[in-house]
Amino acid sequence: MCVSQKACQENLPVLLELLFSKASDSIKTIIVISLGDLTRRFPNELQSYQDKMFNLLDDSKDVRNTGLFIFSQLIMGNIILLKDQVADIYVLIEDQDPRTSQLAQNLVNELERNPYVKEAKPD
């Protein structure tokens, strides 16, 4: 799918269907990493799926941590822009899992230092 934009367009729905199915956490984690790579290569193709991708932050611990890490890289690289999703990240600071909480806190700290993203902060 990284080879061409056409291949990405044609196969992305299948990949997302698998991601939101009852696939194992390891499969979902691999797909999340792949989506991060695809987003870097074809950001416009995945922009319409951004809200769905942020729903992964409600998934299992491993998928949530991987998703949060990948989103952090994409956000800080200004590849994806935050809209309403920033509130979801702030909520994860209070997560039961210490790794999730730390990843969310690190992202929030970076967001507060980044003037471009500061305006997306929730009230």
Image: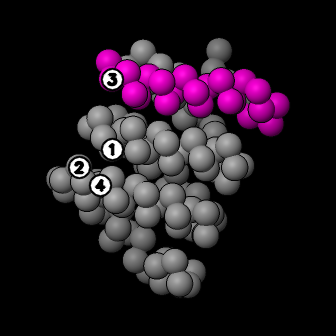
Q: Amino acid at mark 4?
A: Lys
The disc, 1 or 2, on the residue closer to the chain's N-terminal end is: 2
Q: Which residue is mark 4?
A: 28
**Callout 3 environment at 10 Å: few (<14), some (14 to 19), or many (20+)?**
few
Which disc number belongs to residue 25? Answer: 2
The answer, for residue 51, to whether it is visible in the render is: no
Which residue appears at 25% of the width and 59% of the height?
27
The three-letter amino acid code for the residue at tag 2 is Asp
Coordinates of residue 5 in the picture (x, y in percent): 57, 81
Q: CA distance from mark 4 to mark 3?
A: 19 Å
Q: Main secondary structure of the magenta part?
A: helix
Quadrant in the rendering for residue 46: bottom right
Q: Which residues are magenta?
A: 96-117
**Residue at the disc numbered 3:** 97
- Crowding around mark 4 (Cα neighbors within 10 Å: few <14, some 14 to 19, many 20+) is many
Viewer can see residue 97: yes
Q: Earlier in the sequence, mark 1 or mark 3?
A: 1
Q: Are marks 1 and 2 in contact (CB under 8 Å)?
A: yes
Q: Are marks 4 and 2 in contact (CB under 8 Å)?
A: yes
Position above or below: 19 against 52: below
74 or 98, which lies in front? 98
Report x, y in % for residue 72: 57, 41
Q: Nearer the viewer, residue 119 or 101?
A: 101
**Residue 113 in the figure: left or right of residue 52:** right
Q: Check disc 4 and report its element: helix, strand or loop.
A: helix
Figure quadrant of residue 20: bottom left
Q: Position of residue 41 (x, y in %)?
A: 61, 70
As drawn, the label of residue 81 is none
Which residue was labeled with disc 1?
A: 63
111 horizontally vs 97: left or right: right
Query: Magenta span has 109?
Result: yes
